[in-house]
Image: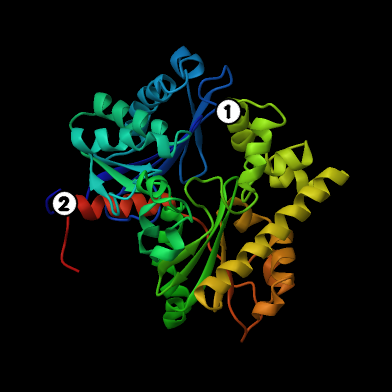
Amino acid sequence: MGETRDTAILTINAGSSSIKLAVFGCEALTQPRLTALVQRIGTPEAAAEIRLPDGARETVTLDDGARLGAGPGTGAGHATALAALLPRLDAHVDVPIVAAGHRVVHGGERFRGPLAIDDTVLASLEELIPLARTHQRHCIAAIRAVARLRPEIPQIACFDTAFHATLPSEARTFALPEPVRRAGVRRYGFHGLSYQWIADVLPTVLGEQAEGRVIAAHLGNGASLCGLVGLESRATTMGFTPLDGLVMGERPGLTDPGALLFMLEEIGMGVEEVRETLLKRSGLLGLSGLSNDMRTLSASAAVEARFALAVYVHRAVREIGAIAAEIGGVDALVFTGGVGENAAAIRAEIVERLGFLGLRIDAARNAAPDRLISPDGEKPVLVLAANEEAVIARETDALLAPRPA
């Protein structure tokens, strides 16, 4: 990228039915110049919107390819959505976009840091689809779409699993026979880009204390915990897939594997029905029968909604205690993600039950919320906004244009 910094980086986070995009000027890689969101790809309600820093919003028209073209595994809807969006992004950014950084959910055992995507890397990413069927193919669809639409710009893969490469061997190993483990069945951990952001900013908030035992709680529609020591991952709740650990919006979290056998053998559910149940019908939605949205459930007086939240909090407390045991205690607790940043009542209920770890919450600070929501002089409990896009932008820029520290 030479000496000039008047260029921009595009970040892309492709989900099963959505794409989040951001454009960062290379002179400021923490705050995007604009963001964009495509939702409900593959349905008649598919919609795209560009959001500018001044609050202005532009609706982008999508053709039938985005509304109807996202057949299972095809990526057609993602490709047509990107084809509609990219020219509109150019219209709002007055410098050239010189690279695209992608959130890639799974890097397997091989990919432990960001890297430039070429045909060989792309083939390897496709080989990892069985490890993350719900997510990986959509990441690949976005990569292929950008390669067709903007063949002149390099693309960088930034892996959600990479941050957890520092897990000790005993923490990443399941007690399964060697042939199964050799096939790649182990704990990988996810939400790594979110935890990397926490590790990046925590020293500016806590100073040397950031190097201690920190538990980060990424709470959103997907949810997990990470135990950091020395700003590196030492424990995490998600495992072989993002189904493990905490209760989530539509996923159950930790579930006895015997229950899955029972679903198959006794209830008579097929494999696809079990898959659909685990990925889309469980969690807060399955418990409440009402919604996967924390805001909806928190506002509801329904007994089912109250119960769903009680299970959610119970599991969070249980797993925080387990992570604390795994890393030898806790010096600070960090909430991040959509629920972690916005659901003050949920934060309060969780921390109220963590007094045995020496954690407390200041009600007024929590309601604000301030960045620090614990009383002065006590173990820090923090709320830090997630910024996975900034991590992708930084990693992409650093890989393409290394500069002396």
Q: Residues within 10 Å of mark 2 (few under 14, many from 20)?
A: few
Query: Please, what secondary structure does the residue beneath circle 1 have?
Result: helix
Residue at x 55% of width, y 55% of height: 224
Q: Which image quadrant is residue 370 in?
A: bottom right
Q: Residues within 10 Å of mark 1 (few under 14, many from 20)?
A: few
Residue at x 63% of width, y 69% of height: 321
User: Is tag 2's residue or tag 1's residue first in the polypeptide sequence?
Assistant: 2
- Separation of residues labelled 2 and 1 (CA atoms): 54 Å
Query: Please, what is the three-letter code of the amino acid marked with disc 1?
Result: Val
- Toward the viewer: 382 or 140? 140
223 vs 129, left or right, is right
- In this rendering, the answer to whether 321 lies above or below 33 is below
Query: Please, what is the three-letter code of the amino acid marked with disc 2?
Result: Thr
Q: Which residue is mark 1?
A: 271
Q: Which residue is mark 2?
A: 4
40 vs 250, left or right, is left
Query: Please, what secondary structure does the residue beneath circle 2 have?
Result: loop
Where, quadrant-wise, is the C terminus in this rendering? bottom left
